[in-house]
Amino acid sequence: MKFREMSEEITSNEILTAFLIIEPEGRLKRYERNRDYIRVFYNMPNDNNSIEHRLDLLPDDVYYIDDEKDYIETPLENGNKMFQYHQFMVAKGYSYLWKNNPY
C-alpha cells in the first residue's frame, strides 16, 4: 500500500467512519476539506440544534476545537479511541507511517 493524501482522497464514508470512531454518539452535520486536515462540524444527542462542535481529523492526530475560541485546540487523549483511529488511518493509507516508507 502507498501513502494517500487524506485531505484530497478520503471519501465521505471514510470521514464518517473516522468521526464515529472518535464520537460514536455524535451526529455529523458537515465537513470541510483543508490543506492537511478535515474539519468536522457535529452536534451531540443532548445538544440543541444551535450548538455546533468542531474537531480536526489529521492523518495521525485528532484535535477538538474550542467552541468559543477558535485558536484553542485540544488533542484527543483517549488512548483506546486514538489507537482505533490510528488503525483506521494506517489501514486506509492516510497515515504518515506510509509516506516514504520503503518497507
Image (spheres, rainbow, N blue to C red):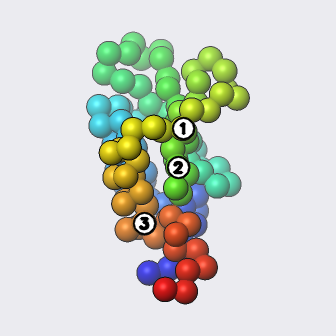
Tag 3: amino acid: Val
x 59%, y 51%: residue: 37
Of callouts 2 and 1, the N-terminal one: 2
Q: Secondary structure at mark 1?
A: strand
Placement of 64 over or under 84, stated as above or below = above
Q: CA distance from mark 2 to mark 3?
A: 12 Å
Read off the residue under disc 2: 61
x 47%, y 15%: residue: 50
Read off the residue under disc 3: 90
x 39%, y 38%: residue: 78
Circle 2/circle 1 CB separation < 8 Å? yes
Image quadrant containing the N terminus: bottom left
Image x and y of residue 94, in percent: 50, 65
Placement of 97 over or under 47, stated as above or below = below
What numbered label is drawn on residue 75? Answer: 1
Of callouts 2 and 3, the N-terminal one: 2
For this view, does 53 lie left or right of residue 66?
left
Image x and y of residue 4, in percent: 53, 71
Asked which quadrant contains residue 7, the reply is: bottom right
Q: CA distance from mark 3 to mark 1?
A: 19 Å
Q: CA distance from mark 2 to mark 1?
A: 7 Å
For this view, does 16 lie left or right of residue 8?
left
x 54%, y 38%: residue: 75
Tag 2: amino acid: Asp
Tag 1: amino acid: Pro
- Regarding residue 2, the answer to whether it shows in the image is yes
For this view, does 85 lie left or right of residue 71?
left
